[in-house]
Amino acid sequence: MRPASDQAPTVPTVLSALDQVEPRVWKGAMPVQFLYTAGAAGERFFQTLKRKGVFVVTRCEECRLTYLPPRIYCERCFADLSETWREVAPVGKVHTHTLVHVDRQGRNAASPTLVAFVRIDGTDGGLVTRLLEIAPADVRIDMPVELVLAPKRRRRGTLDDIIGFRNRR
Amino acid sequence: MKRKPQRRVAVIGAGMSLFMRRALETGKELSYYAASQALETAGVRLKEIQAVVMATAPDAFDGVHMKGEWLLDGAGGVRKPYLRAYVGGGSGVFSIISGWTLVASGLFDLVLVVAEEKMSSCQPHPQGAFLTIFDHTIERPLGPNLLWIFSLEQHRYMATYGIRNEDIALVSVKNKRNALDHPVAQVAASLTVKDVLASEVVAWPVHRLMVSPISDGAAAIVLASEDVARRLSDKPIWVQGVGWSLDTSYWGNRDLAYPRYVERAARMAYEMAGISEPRRQIHVAEPYDPFAYKELHHLEGLQLSDKGKAPEDLARGRFERTGELPTCPSGGLMGVGNPIAAAGLMKLCELFWQLRGEAGARQVPGNPERGLAQAWGDLMQVGTVAILGVN
Amino acid sequence: MLEYGWDAGVAISRFLDGLKAGKILGVRCNVCGRTVTPPRAFCELDFKPIDAWVELPDTGTINTYSICYITWDMKPLRKPQIPAVIEIDGTTPRAGFLHLIGGVKGSSVESIRKQLRVGMPVRAVWRKPDQREGAITDILHFEPVRGRRR
């Protein structure tokens, strides 16, 4: 029901109730943490990187897609890719890059971080990563880069094994 | 229901991943296992699927915000119309309802419906995520946990009708035993009522063996319009009716002894399916059983037992796999496991196999022609019902 | 970890003010005729503003209770919590709300069940006035009213 045009709409009495009370805010949290698994494909990716310093990928011949990070299925046709593993060299090109001046809490970072999305050669995928040993002004789109991995004894089979990418020599 | 839908919808394939305590696979991978199996049994390729429905419960279980989108590729939804269906624990059965609306409306002819949950991610216990379903101002300061509302409801149910805990423990015994025949079951067991009541009291009257487990898993089905179903399948299983309803979120204001929301959902589904005598016309049922008492509570809401009489029916064998109305022949959530949304859709997979006579050692005798699956959730307030049949 | 600040809202803020003053407030809807507490700004059945605020007694009955021996993260509790749905006198039947039962001896299921039953009258046990903060916990718990039958 619409109010008549010459009348102000009636404000229900309950809407004014806040005038009479002290509104309150309750603080709380959802007290949970998570244990994530890398999954069948992710586990193989990280273990191979740790052991051999290369990327493993999977390939769907029908859709002509090479997955990096690898997947055990093709997202387009649902083909089972769990027998299509191959290794590729950990080199690629800067697809896009940015200079990040704030940390995760939104505060100004002490020094800016150079972040890029690197497309890995011979695949249809890539990784978000840091760019190392290069001044921000010198980064170019499509610049060839190579993986910088933690020393073998310090690798744990996680994303932290990847320190970043640097200019390909 | 304003008018009966014109287009018929059939289930033509079903698939499940293992249900387990802790899967190393990601939720996407679990979804893929179930979805690809459903497609394979339907003889349908992913590119023929026109839309995808994904049911998955709170983001806080998997610990992935907007996990519907995250699960997209495992559900086969890439580059397709994609819909996340979510009504808490009721999501699994709500997923077929959502898929049904997409086909019955004429929008699509082939829809893939997937349900997934990976609760093992959530530490130290998924209850930490459930805490926030209690009102932050007037309930959480009391220090509640999820078991409170179920134990309170079970006690009210027992007190209203004079039901003994022995009668309720029998649900755990039946379902865990039925699950011994289910190849993906997580907590199948051969137990006695005494065993169940000897397990520790977690929140009286609820004992540990009256509670379903924490689970990881996925399930999927393929839905087709009538013409497509007849072309692709020798034995399409028809969705004869669907219904759903939510009661007030002030859970203390509801009648805790009787699930009125389930009754409303069931009446909608019965009307659509043309069912006037559900006890005669439903041949196999998969009521939702995350807690032992809920199966009985729900059977009454579904009008499949008189109020307060489901325990007696159970005790005299009516709900056994060989009984007059087999309930949870799959083994239910108490036996197969409870990856929330996937557990609801598991019940529909079970009806699909039962009605096609493909349930193997779980097959109920007598060539059942019509089955009902039901789930329940949100803040104990939603009933979701689907009725499947051979014609 | 994420933390949240939740607004109590119009109706619950007023309810909390009532608790601070030692009163249980409820609301009435004249269309469905229900009187309920905790209060709400609108009747969810009739979808209209509630018609009146009422002061309710601090007595009621146990709709149901449970005896809970674990915390949310599955740690055992030696002294169980006894959550209950309490129907406050003067509210519509079956319109209860969650609180705790106290003043009960022992910690075993058997001893607690001997002292409590569904339908039993209870009374609120309040914090001292100077310790109240306008929270649901200004009522410490409800305890059985001895020698009163309904």
Image: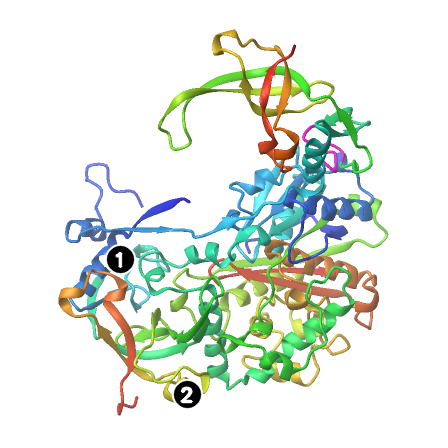
- Numbered label attached to residue C12: 1
Subunit bearing disc 2 = C
Is residue B50 visible from the viewing direction of this image?
A: no
Cα distance in 3D space between marks 2 and 1: 36 Å
Q: Earlier in the sequence, mark 2 or mark 1?
A: 1
Magenta-tinted stretch: A68-77
Residue nearest the viewer, comparing A81 with A32: A32
Q: Quadrant of residue B152?
A: bottom left
- Numbered label attached to residue C111: 2
Q: How many marks?
A: 2
Q: Secondary structure at mark 1?
A: helix
Three-letter amino acid code at disc 1? Ile
Subunit bearing disc 1 = C
Q: In the rendered view, tell whether residue A102 sits above or below residue B147.
A: above
State left or right for residue C9 relative to residue B321: left
Counting from the top left corner in percent of width and height, residue B331 is at 70, 68
- Main SS, magenta residues: loop
How did the renderer colour the structure? rainbow
Q: Quadrant of residue B347?
A: bottom right
State left or right for residue B138 relative to residue B326: left
